[in-house]
Image (cartoon, coloured by chain):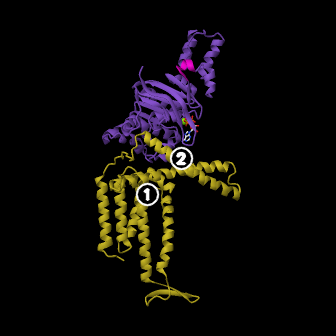
Chain colours: A yellow, B purple
Amino acid sequence: MLKLDCFAYTNALRRVHPGEKLAFALLSMTACLASAGPLVPLLVLALMTVAITRGARVPGHVYLKLMLVPLGFALAGVVTVAFNLGRAGSTYLFSITVHGLTISTSYADLYRAGLILAKSIGATSCLYFLTLTTPVVEVACLLRKARLPALWVELLCLIYRFIFVVMETAEKIYISQSARWGYSTLKNAYRSLGQLVSVLLVRSLHHSRALYTALLARGYDGELQVLEERFEVSRKNWAFITGTGAVLFFLGLAGRGWPF
Amino acid sequence: MKYILEARDLYFTYPDGTPALKGASLAVEEGKRVAILGPNGAGKTTLFLHFNGILRPQKGKVLYAGKEVQYDRRFLKQLRREVGIVFQDPDSQLFSASVFQEVSFGPMNLGLPKEEVARLVEEAMEATEISALRDKPTHLLSYGQKKRVCLAGVLAMKPRVLICDEPTAGLDPKYARQSMELFDRLHQRGTTIILATHDVDLAYSWADYAYFMEGGKVVGEGLPQEVFRDTRLLESCNLTRPWLVEFFELLCSQKVLPEDSSPPRNREELVQLFLAV
Ligand SMILES: Nc1ncnc2c1ncn2[C@@H]1O[C@H](COP(=O)(O)OP(=O)(O)OP(=O)(O)O)[C@@H](O)[C@H]1O
Ligand SMILES: [Mg+2]
């Protein structure tokens, strides 16, 4: 989570207009999910992998590790689609019986499982593209432009900022506790953890009050107005985004699952 | 003499019953560099919060440019535009993860056009040398960098009076010196500057006028070359004498310097003094 956040600020696509990145991710994701066959999801996965590792220059091993997490979940979920309890129809591929319990699978089931797997991995790669290349603050700008209620967007930004403040505070308290043997035995650890949580709560309250004071001092009157940084709109990028989007949609829908 | 900010006999008790101000009075002249010194818990921060109307005194009054501060929306808005405060703890001032957005908050509240805001933000970021940090999120900045972002956030509003609560605490010597140079530049352009600090050497060399606070009251004030020789006053505020004063008095008592010479304000003046005898 923290690593993701760091890459969002340091990646090679940082200066690209956030709207373009969002459009790219969303279009590809929609094409991936709407596709009838597994070809388009696999294409999307390949496209995003290139965009993330070559375009944004996120190290390959980091990306691989990140992808393995959802892959594990997806595999576990897909197993229940691929295999049926009880004897399948006449088209079954194979079946085994253990203690009177029959597990079977068929081509259709395997195809369906594969499709779901491809779609979920493809869609995940799109989301990773967005989170690895676009800081939360800039996503929030887009949401504001999309006319989402200002309150929601402000809340999102404040929560995002506070996550780090709270984490830093927790870390400091933890370090100071363990420096005084706070976690040396199980009993100590329970007590220290309890204290940490309660102190964290009080600190957060205090912190929010101090923040409110500081905002007032700069003329806050109910709305967190900020100026957003400008980004260059690139025609080349938009041409690329609409081009790939069109091709992906065409392959996914017109082909109705071609060539599989 | 024209006073830009005046506190007259302020009393303030926090809701939990801590009496933070017990009859504090001071008057700051326009265009001056003022240092406020005092031990922890003396009430410096509390006093500052009265200067732009965030806290309201339970007794006494605050005057801005000769007018008594009114606690209605319009007056407060104007007051907060002209009196900027940079707080002690940068983490409690930063609300945005983006440096640029953070700095733009103040000028946006003034209702200026966007181009003007962008210009003010760039100017403030340049003055505090944080332009290179613009792409970094605030949670990845160091303490000193955060402090400079906070300063930029207030500078961007172009305040007439700049109040800084311990601006150099936590800064490395280079940036501490640069901040002081920045304050001097602002001072030359006519900004009144009020600093709270525990650093007697800094206050002695920099300030035009110094106030000492203790226990919620102003217990001493005067020109630095006079008040910083008052050992009893300094001791009552848990402060020591500046090294220049200490050294100067040693030289006087050893008859190296004549008794009636005035103490040097900085290293250069000390050298001058030496070369003269
Ligand atoms: N929000 C608060 N609620 C209750 N008491 C407070 C609050 N803020 C400050 N105090 C108390 O008011 C007194 C004055 O505090 P203040 O912060 O003004 O001191 P200070 O001179 O700024 O000290 P320092 O040099 O440590 O910053 C202290 O005794 C402090 O404990
Ligand atoms: Mg203070």
Question: Of residues A120 and B73, which is closer to you in this image?
Answer: B73
Q: CA distance from mark 1 to mark 2?
A: 31 Å
x and y percentages locating residue A246 in the rendered image: 29, 65
Q: Is residue A99 magenta?
A: no
> Which is more foreground, mark 1 or mark 2?
2
Question: Of residues A238 and B212, which is closer to you in this image?
Answer: B212
Q: Residue at x 53, y 18 (%)?
A: B268
As shown in the figure, which amino acid type bears the numbered disc 1? Thr
Crowding at mark 1 (Cα within 10 Å: few <14, some 14-19, many 20+): many
Q: Is residue B222 magenta?
A: yes
x and y percentages locating residue A210 in the rendered image: 50, 43
Q: Chain of mark 2?
A: A
Residue A77 seen in this snapshot: yes
Q: Quadrant of residue B182?
A: top left
> Is A24 placed above or below B242 here?
below
Residue range of the region highlighted in magenta in the rendering: B220-227
Circle nearer the N terminus (1, 2)? 1
Q: Quadrant of residue B158?
A: top left
As shown in the figure, which amino acid type bears the numbered disc 2? His
Left or right of residue B259: residue A222: left
Badge 1 and badge 2 in a common chain: yes
Question: Of residues B233 and A6, which is closer to you in this image?
Answer: B233
For the C terminus of chain A, the image quarter is: bottom left
Question: To which residue does mark 1 refer?
Answer: A131
Q: Quadrant of residue A250?
A: bottom left
Q: Residue at x 65, y 50 (%)?
A: A177
**Disc 1, SS:** helix
Q: Is mark 2 within 8 Å of ligand 1?
A: yes
**Disc 2, SS:** helix
Question: To which residue does mark 2 refer?
Answer: A206
Rendered-image quarter of ligand 1: top right
